[in-house]
Image (cartoon, rainbow, N blue to C red):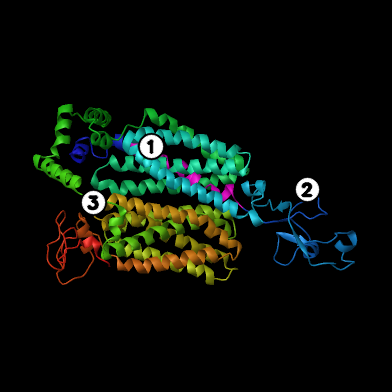
Amino acid sequence: MGYDEAILKLGDFGRYQKIIYILICLTSIPVAFHKLAGVFLLAKPDFRCLLPFEEQNATYELPLHLWNLSYPQGQVCEYYDVEYSPEYLNNSVPRSSNQTTGCSRYVYDQSKYLNSAVTEWNLVCKRGFLAAFSDSLFMLGVLLGSIVFGQLSDKYGRKPILFASLVIQVLFGVLAGVAPEYITYTAARLMVGATTSGVFLVAYVIAMEMVGPAKRLYAGIFVMMFFSVGFMLTTAFAYFVHDWRWLQIALTLPGLLFMCYYWIIPESARWLLSKGRKECAIANMQKAARFNKVEISNEELGALLDEGETEEDKARQKLDDQERDDSPPPSVWDLFCYPNLRRKTLLIFLDWLVCSGVYYGLSWNTNNLGGNVLVNFVISGAVEIPAYIFLLLTLNRWGRRSIQCGSLVLAGLSLLATVVVPEKMHTLVVCCAMLGKLAITASYGTVYIFSAEQFPTVVRNVALGAASMVARISSMLAPFLNYLATIWTPLPLLICGSLSLAAGLLSLLLPETHNKPMLETIADGERFGKKTKGDVYLETGRELRPTPETQPLNEPAENGTKANGHKF
């Protein structure tokens, strides 16, 4: 199809496209609200057991001598099982036993947080893992949403699925705010997590489909920048709204503003053309032309859309369809049947796992950095903006591998530095952690493009889908990673730093893809980056020459067995 040529006739990225693009980008902001809200909704303040001699409304502060008489050293989930008589409390009689008993009620420090889901449902001590489990299920929702809403948007269109996701997000967002107990809250948050994929992924696809090839890199990066803006705006809500239930509702209600999009946002013309609805696509394009004050007839638009599809293209497409009918459909398992392709696939999956896990681990770890939580949180969002600007300036100049490797290594070294910096140098610890966040954001933005260029066309979609699933699995584990801070505060940063450094160094084993032709076949993918005596230059769309070193992987080997039957 000649849709890219038609876009140029409509004014390229004209006034109409800019307005629609900005409106689409705005939907990324509430997605960030919901993804980062757990930092405040499930905030765990300092706490201790409510002691037998205290009233229910007791404050967290306790004189030091009473603390020593009541709690074992370093323990707040248990207290001494003794009679707290006036004589014992004024230290007139010694402690009769060192036996301890668990808490039945708790007292929370309200100096930082008025309340949270943790304080309301006592998700501390033996129940402390439930807070991490709730965030983990939220990310499970993100994974399920990316599968379900992605398929629905391909089948029924971008616009109806985007609008349906926004409606469901508002409904379940409010339900999470009024949930009477933990299970209802967690189930509602899981549904909200699913809708964040429905909103963000569909909006991202619409943004990419409405611009030409030359502007796609910028279009994708700016969508992510709006997510970072939502990241920072979450801080403003948390600053003014102190009750966790009202905070959840306040973060949800802005979604109502996007309900008017049903009458504003057009259906993707690319999707309409892919479904054979050419007249509807032309009608949408004429609307853009009138807004941009461009005069073009329906016949001219139709000719432009047909221009990119010559008789030769139709014949090649027919031949490709016949070949696909004669061969099984590609699957992710094809990536593991050949040694070089398997090695690259595992390395790419590792990069996705580390980028996602470390990104969300750092985003949710601001409570453990000490100091002002709100300041740490807003800085954590702000450093993403220069990371994306860095990518815009360098991604097409320095190459993908060097940026991917350099960003991961820098993130690893920065996060490991937080472990050796003295705790009293709090500002330096935060600076190192935020430098790590900047670097991992740059790496996360790079891995999308780098991965797409590593996989051959015949398995690119399934490969990227599998890589994204690996990323979601690591983000589901990120809440439990931060839970390790209860054992040793720097432990999450130590693990994140070690993983980032290892993944960065291993990324050097991947071949550079910048200014290289796109890989088309499985044989291209196996050959790319593999040094052999018969090294030949890969040309786009061409199979490898059938020399002994570059035998096509779908042809029989000399011993009469299939190449994919080899034991590597």
The picture places residue 114, in percent across and down from the top left corner, at 66, 47
The answer to which of 546 and 240 lies nearer the viewer is 546
Question: What crowding class fits label 1: few (fewer than 14 Cα within 10 Å), some (14-19), or many (20 or more)?
Answer: some
Q: Which residue is mark 3?
A: 458
The picture places residue 44, in percent across and down from the top left corner, at 62, 53
Which of labels 2 and 1 is toward the front?
2
Q: Which numbered circle lies on residue 23?
A: 1
Whether 38 is among the magenta residues is: yes
Q: Amino acid at mark 1?
A: Leu
Is label 3 in a helix, a strand or a loop? helix
Question: What crowding class fits label 3: few (fewer than 14 Cα within 10 Å), some (14-19), or many (20 or more)?
Answer: some
Kindly report the distance in space between the C-alpha atoms of the residues bearing marks 3 and 2. 65 Å
| Residue 173, placed above or below residue 367 | above
Q: Are the residues flagged by discs 2 and 1 in contact, CB closer than 8 Å?
A: no
Relative to 384, 331 lies left or right: left
| Marker count (numbered) | 3
**Which residue is drawn at the image coordinates 22% and 27% (left, top)?**
279
The picture places residue 311, in percent across and down from the top left corner, at 9, 39
**Which residue is drawn at the image coordinates 24% and 46% (left, top)?**
213
In magenta, the rendered stretch is 19-43
| Residue 74, placed above or below residue 31 | below
Question: Which label's residue is closer to the chain start, 3 or 2?
Answer: 2
Q: Amino acid at mark 3?
A: Val
Quadrant of residue 334 within the rendered picture: bottom left
Q: Main secondary structure of the magenta part?
A: helix
